[in-house]
Amino acid sequence: MIKLLKNTILATAFLAVSGAYAAPILEVSSDGRLTGASGVEVGGALYDVAFKDGTCAGLFSGCDQAADFQFKSKTEGEAASLALENQVFVDGLAGLFDSAPRATLGCENLEHCAIYTPFAKPQSAGIVTVSKFTNEATGQNFPDRTETVNLDITGTTAGTTASVWAVWTPHASLPATSVPEPGTLSALAIGAFALLRTRRQRSRGARV
């Protein structure tokens, strides 16, 4: 019983430190180009992302209503861009997707690639606000960065060499196990210790 309680406490602490989400699965074409990823964590939820060329109007149902976008605020858009930087544009066995921007579908530029995540329609008609993540090649003078910019909804990335749209959708597989809030973790730990203490007290009483 005591061993079980100790294991429960250790497992609870492990969840608090490590989180409950696995690394996303990178989608790579037959010629080695990064086309997207599955199971990217953004704000505690999982999403799939695909990199596509075209216009915002064509890729996002007109790109003129808040409902057209997966993310609805600057904070959410920036979180999506940060997830791209930390989880998707990484160097690994699948490819050098951080070091070599041209390894991303839609980007041929040797130095950088901009990935647009739209999140809000501003006041001006025909203009969309996006979170722009720029992946810089290794050795460049500028680090990878995220900024907010306004773009024409009919402007296309097709034919350009250094930009592409990120089309986000909820992750298609089973929901990930949620991570307990800090307060919940504390309650679990306190409860486990209380049970352990009661068990010890009963054991001592039985020896008297």
Image (cartoon, helix red, strand yellow):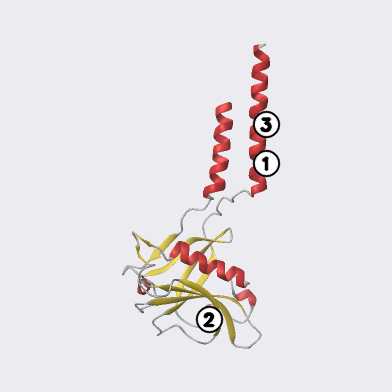
Q: Is residue 69 above or below residue 125?
A: above
Let me know if residue 62 appears in the view: no
The residue under label 1 is 187
Badge 3 or badge 2: first in the primary sequence? 2
Q: Residue furthest top?
A: 208
Q: Nearer the viewer, residue 207 or 164?
A: 207
| Disc number placed over residue 56 in the picture, else none | 2
Badge 2 or badge 1: first in the primary sequence? 2
Q: Is residue 164 above or below residue 2?
A: below
Q: Quadrant of residue 74?
A: bottom right
The CA distance from mark 2 to mark 1 is: 47 Å
Mark 3 or 2: the one toward you: 3
Q: Residue furthest front?
A: 141
The answer to whether the residues at label 3 and label 2 have Cβ atoms under 8 Å apart is no
Q: Quadrant of residue 192?
A: top right
Q: Considering the numbered disc 1 on the image, is that residue within a helix, a strand or a loop?
A: helix
Residue 197, image x and y in percent? 66, 27
| Local crowd size for mark 3, using a 10 Å CA cut-off: few (<14), some (14–19), many (≥20) | few
Amino acid type of disc 2?
A: Cys
The residue under label 3 is 194
The answer to whether the residues at label 3 and label 1 have Cβ atoms under 8 Å apart is no
Amino acid type of disc 1?
A: Ala
| Disc number placed over residue 92 in the picture, else none | none
Residue 179, image x and y in percent? 59, 50
Q: Quadrant of the N terminus?
A: top right
The CA distance from mark 3 to mark 2 is: 57 Å
